[in-house]
Image (cartoon, helix red, strand yellow):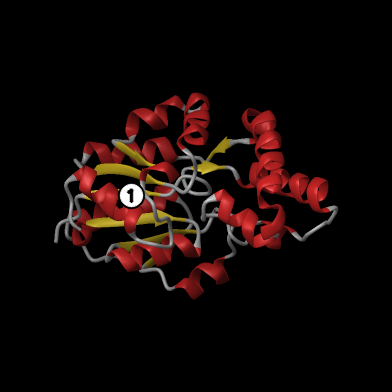
């Protein structure tokens, strides 16, 4: 089938929030639990909804962890968030070629809107945002991706999902969507390869080039 829809994760894919997330998580764990945890432990479940990440850290104090995390995150958001190089140009190319573009994220809509105030062009280039509030189930469940396809009027075989986490790959597989993992996010390459994506590329510009080749019916490298 001809590729008609390009779906993207947000954190670690279009926007570099890894340091913001790491510092906020470290602050919350230190303040609430009085512990120091390795970076890889703090980032291990990025890509799932934040309340779920806190439950995995300490189910009995998840609400407190969440509150302290969000206070720190909001206070330092604009100073620590970064846009990955080439993202806007890549999305512009996809739009010029007629692809529908949607973001599927486990973030709250408020958090996405905070990022779009810093990078307003991203909001102009994305047709639809599916956030945590929009579906009862979340990645790695396929429901958010299927919701995005419904909004774009596309079928699973006509779409690809680009993300930086094993949860993104799992959600794409469950939805019957081609999965493209990008290596510039929070997860090491070995973890991404173990998830078994259809493609693994360095970043979004390379992902866009791949998607354009697929749309033209060319063999993917």
Q: Residues within 10 Å of mark 1 (few under 14, many from 20)?
A: many
Front residue of 179 and 189: 179
Q: Which residue is mark 1?
A: 7
Q: Is residue 128 left or right of residue 1?
A: right
**Quarter the C terminus occupies:** bottom left
Front residue of 199 and 175: 175
Residue 36 percent across, percent down from the top left: 83, 56
Front residue of 30 and 191: 30
Residue 129 percent across, percent down from the top left: 36, 39
Residue at image position (64%, 45%) is 21
Whether residue 43 is visible, yes or no, is: yes
Residue at image position (49%, 65%) is 166
Q: Is residue 62 left or right of residue 216?
A: right
Residue at image position (47%, 72%) is 195
Residue 98 percent across, percent down from the top left: 19, 40
Whether residue 131 is visible, yes or no, is: no
Q: Quadrant of residue 143?
A: bottom left
Residue that sits furthest to the right in the current view: 34
**Quarter the N terminus occupies:** bottom left
Residue that sits furthest to the front in the current view: 60
- Disc 1 element: strand
Residue at image position (43%, 49%) is 9
Badge count: 1
Front residue of 199 and 110: 110
Q: Is residue 51 left or right of residue 205?
A: right
Residue 73 percent across, percent down from the top left: 66, 36
């Amino acid at each position: 089938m001809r590729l008609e829809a390009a779906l993207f994760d947000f954190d670690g894919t279009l926007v570099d929030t890894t340091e913001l997330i790491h510092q906020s998580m470290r602050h919350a764990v230190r303040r609430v639990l009085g512990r120091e945890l390795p970076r890889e432990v703090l980032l291990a479940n990025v890509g799932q909804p934040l309340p779920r990440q806190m439950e995995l850290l300490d189910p009995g104090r998840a609400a407190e962890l969440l509150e302290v995390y969000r206070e720190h995150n909001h206070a330092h958001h604009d100073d620590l968030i970064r846009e990955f190089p080439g993202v806007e140009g890549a999305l512009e190319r996809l739009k010029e070629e007629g692809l529908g573009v949607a973001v599927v994220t486990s973030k709250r809509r408020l958090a996405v809107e905070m990022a779009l105030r810093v990078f307003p062009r991203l909001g102009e280039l994305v047709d639809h945002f599916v956030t945590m509030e929009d579906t009862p189930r979340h990645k790695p469940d396929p429901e958010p991706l299927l919701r995005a396809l419904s909004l774009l009027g596309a079928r699973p075989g006509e779409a690809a999902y680009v993300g930086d986490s094993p949860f993104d790959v799992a959600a794409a597989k469950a939805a019957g969507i081609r999965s493209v993992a990008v290596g510039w996010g929070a997860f090491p390459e070995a973890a991404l390869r173990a998830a078994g994506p259809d493609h693994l590329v360095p970043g979004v510009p390379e992902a866009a080039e791949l998607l354009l080749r697929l749309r033209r019916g060319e063999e993917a490298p």
